Amino acid sequence: MAGRGQHFIPQHFQKPFVIPDGKDQLWMYRRGSSTAIPVARKDAAKERDFNSPPSLDGLPTLDDLITDYEKRLFPMVDQIRGLKSGQIIPADMIAEIAVHLSIRTAYVRRVFTEIVGKLFSSLTDVLEKPENFMSGNTFPAYVIPPKIEELLIEKIEEMAWYKSVGISSSTLARIGYFHLRERKEEVSKKVPDILGLLRDSPLADPRNLIAGSHNKILSQEFAPKARVEELSKLDWFVVAHNQASAILPDCVCFGVDSNGDAKPFLLLEKDKIEIVVLPLSPSTLAVGRHGNYSEFDPAKYNQLAARMSFDFFLTNEKKPELLEFLSGATGNVRHDLHTLVKGALSENQWGLFVDDQPDSNRETTSFFEKIQPKEDDEYNSLNLSFIGCADQERANLIGRHVCYIIAQFLSPTVASFLDGVTFAADYEDALNNCSRGFEPSRKLQSYQGDDGVGVAMPILVVRDGNYKVRIIARCYIGDLFLSENEDDYKLALAAITHALANAEFLYIQHERFPDQILKSISDPIEGFLQFYSGGVFATYYITRVAGHPLETVVEQEAKLTKKIALFFQEVIEKRRAYRTDENLDEFFSFAVSKACDLLNCFAKLFASRRSIEDEPPRTEAFVKILVRHDLIDWASLFERDLDDFYEGLPIWSDYKKLFFINRHLERLLFMFGILVELQNGGQIYIHVPLGNDANYLNNLIQNLQS
């Protein structure tokens, strides 16, 4: 297991650069120092707990995983070092080596720390004139305002990292905007408060932030596939370095772009790479170049490598000219970083109905009140059917209960939208063989999850040319109405009232958007996501108006706490299996179903909280797991968005506002490297690179938040 002191340039790679007969030492030329100092190879390019602290539970640490990976990599290094000058180097081998060594180094942290520092110093203009960046007091939950989207896309496309990720700027802007909303309160404070926060918080010295991000990158992929593919396209040769001993820069690998500018490999733009250089030993270099690019002059190597170094370089020689190279060692890189950040801050698939002006005169349906059963209340007649269950006498008794509940629970207007109720022994068969009055686009499936199965569902039907809703329920729900056990009756009552609440939400949508019912959503991304997320707000609405009498809020939180832990465990395991079997459909279907299940559980919990008078505080265990998985801010935002949409239902006139649920689904999927984007041909592309585990693209989050 990993202990204290971990190398960010592997000792194995440093070995050829040691001082001859120097007791396994190297000369270190460090920026700001007037002389070179000898350092032992075991202490060079090393930091305490650089990748991970020592394991306390015996589980492999990040450093252990890197060590295991490099056991496969280093034989390839030795094989390439055995080649002679002029020989061809296998492109796939050297590309993987160069990429891994580049992202493994402390150089990554130094560079991004510099970037974040410059970004924070550049925030002053925005903070002093926030109206230039944001208009209004709120951010829409469902869509990026056009001005902010335009700004985000423009700035994202200016950043060097953008061209290497293979994701459209509009998709990145959508994700970045959500994270801006998630941390909206931090952004919208008064200027003095924000400046004080930046000055006093760890963000003022972003080293810890960057270290965490770097570790996440490494834990996801030791040699990112996209970068390896870039370098594999080059022609690689061994080039002799006879002028003097070649130095080993802290960035390890650098290149030259099509403009003739030398840059560390990680700062090179993907489409502009012309040549890449990696030192193999003091006398040999690995040089990759495009076929039409001129030969690399090894005589310029040491000077260029010194300029590329951020903090230091290592060598087996002590020469005065190396100190001269060092005097300008970071000027080139820092200038590039300054340029990089300059100006960076200056069942219901219904169609869209765009109406930006809410109609305050539109009649709305009143919310339900909990029923108070009375034995002598009248009940209305209703079309009820029993398939494979109940004789006539039993059907009449059940029917009295159901009709009474409907009369107490629904307004007459909404009750007229109800076609009837069917109790069936074969629930799935009844769902799909009920006369709908139209040809459904897909088969209906009942809910099946860890916490039970669906027992009642409202489905849309057409009767005499009018849309109505029929409730299909499992037959034993009807039987429970006749039980003398109070808990049985509560279960039946909850099942029917929840189905009625769902029916009212369908009624509201039908009344507001009558011309859009059963039409596909015109926006491909929104339609694709709502196929999965369409029932989440219905869950919130149902629980908010009908309550959740079977579980207390504390019981729901305890169950959800366990579900969150299991969610992360199962999706990560499934993702690792995907790296082997490459079954994208299976992995995505699994992950999106789990994410929607989680959204539904959160929606049910938040609605339950709002439906009781005295909301208890969140339990300690629940808060801890939200913090552990970086969900605490997201959960608060999700709760606010659900409540805001619910309170705005009386004036809801724009269907696409319901798409705020899609943004939250994307947020959960994004944690596991799943990103849905629309390609130029209008096709949906699910971006799930093979080489990554949980929390993929966290480095992009840092850039997007900046």
Image (spheres, helix red, strand yellow):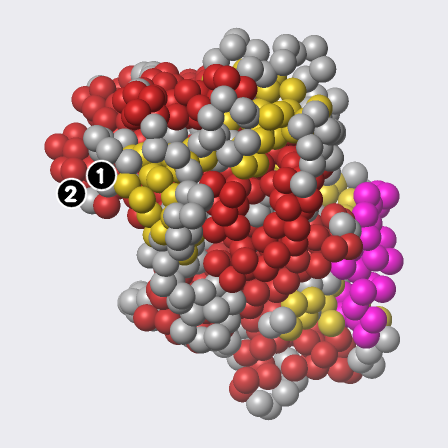
Residue 631 is at least partly visible in this image:
no
Q: Position of residue 278 (x, y in %)?
A: 55, 31
Which residue is denoted by mark 1 in the rendering?
204
**From what the image shows, is residue 214 above or below residue 351?**
below
Residue furthest to the bottom in view is: 484
Name the residue rendered at 81%, 43% in the picture. 441
Place of residue 205 in the rendered image (x, y in percent of width and height, measured from the top left): 24, 41
Quadrant position of residue 190:
top left
Instruction: Point out the image quarter for the C terminus.
Output: top left
Q: Amino acid at mark 1?
A: Ala
Q: How many numbered circles are shown?
A: 2
Q: Which residue range is magenta in the image?
A: 418-445
Residue 170 in percent (x, y) is at 55, 25
Q: Is residue 154 left or right of residue 92?
A: left
Q: Residues within 10 Å of mark 2 (few under 14, many from 20)?
A: few
Disc number for residue 200: 2
Q: Are marks 1 and 2 in contact (CB under 8 Å)?
A: yes
* Crowdedness near tag 1: few (<14), some (14–19) or many (≥20) residues, C-alpha within 10 Å: some
* Local secondary structure at mark 1: helix
- Taking the magenta stretch, the answer to whether it contains residue 195 is no
The secondary element bearing badge 2 is classed as helix
